[in-house]
Amino acid sequence: MTFDDIGRNGGDTAPAPAFARPEHRRRSLGHSDLVGADGEVGYLHSVETAGTVDGPGVRFVVFLTGCALRCQYCHNPDCLHLKDGNLVRADDVVAEIGRYAKFLKRARGGVTVTGGEPLVQPAFTTRILEGAKRLGLHTALDTSGHLGALADDRLLAATDLVLLDIKSADPDIYRETTGRELAPTLAFADRLDRLGKPVWARFVLVPGLTDDPANVRGVAAICAAHGTVERVDVLPFHQMGAEKWEKLGLTYRLADTPEPTEVETERARQVFRDAGIAVVF
Ligand code: SF4
């Protein structure tokens, strides 16, 4: 999930649909139903039926749980563990999407699978993406790319667009920001480039953390070096997720971090434009 899934969508994700509620889970899935390699079942946090910032047109957005990263600015710390979600069947998720398929097609939209990190559950994600394709819908995968090696050819064949978070170009800043290494994301970007898979990059501008001019230029250079990056969204850090950290009793390290000014955000966006990358947000 990107930093701004809650921020820009105004936090209006729908609660877990009926098929994802615990009572239904107990009724329909027994102890023998485990999240396995076949992806028949997986952990779902919630869905949003009319997202407008996670791919082209109006999107049915599927939020899965589980993430290997621990971004300092994560707006969904309640999505980081698989068990933060409810165990559901992929077929039921696809059936739910089907109820909106006509509308989504008319709105030139589609389905976006996000999280958390969808690649924590690659087989489950594949089934949802393939189900959406069977419905004739455009599909997008929203990922940090850290687990890109788990996205096999089948998953990528069912993915029309990758929303790729490039959280830093500097390995030290990336580690400081996410707790993980940068290299897997770069390797995934390279692979997407070789496959000719369209990418929309996302970069969160955090004062004092990711906003070093050399780092911004580095992210722009990564985007420019990958011909399949069609655009970048430069997302200014904001404090809208702070409350969740507090509620969960977690230490929120950015409590005193200011939001970037419009001038600072625009300056960063210009760096990308200067590198020849289209900037939409
Ligand atoms: S990659 Fe994971 S930790 Fe980082 S913002 Fe997304 S969900 Fe949160």
Image: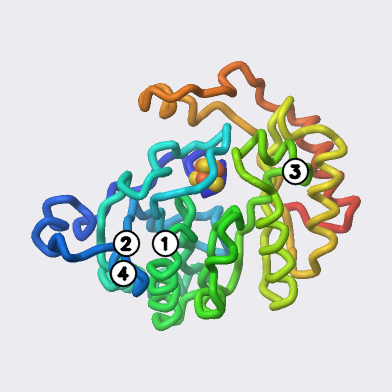
Q: Which residue is mark 2?
A: 42
**Residue 211 pos. (x, y %):** 77, 33
Considering every residue shown, the one lying at the far top of the view is: 256
Badge 1 amino acid = Gln
**Residue 22 pos. (x, y %):** 17, 50
| Dot placed on the residue nearer the N-terminal end, 4 or 2 | 2
Q: Relative to residue 185, is residue 123 depicted above or below?
A: below
Q: Are marks 2 and 1 in contact (CB under 8 Å)?
A: yes
**Residue 146 pos. (x, y %):** 60, 55
Residue 258 visible from this viewpoint: yes
Q: Are marks 1 and 4 in contact (CB under 8 Å)?
A: no
| Dot placed on the residue nearer the N-terminal end, 1 or 4 | 4
Badge 3 amino acid = Pro
Q: Which mark is residue 171?
A: 3
Callout 3 crowding tier (Cα within 10 Å): few <14, some 14–19, many ≥20: some
Badge 4 amino acid = Ala
| Dot placed on the residue nearer the N-terminal end, 2 or 1 | 2
How much space separates mark 1 and mark 4, taking CA atoms? Answer: 11 Å
Q: 45 or 101: nearer the eye?
A: 45
| Dot placed on the residue nearer the N-terminal end, 2 or 3 | 2
How much space separates mark 2 and mark 1, taking CA atoms? Answer: 7 Å
Tell me if 252 is positioned left or right of 248 in this view: right
Which of the two marks, 2 or 3, is nearer to us in this view? 3
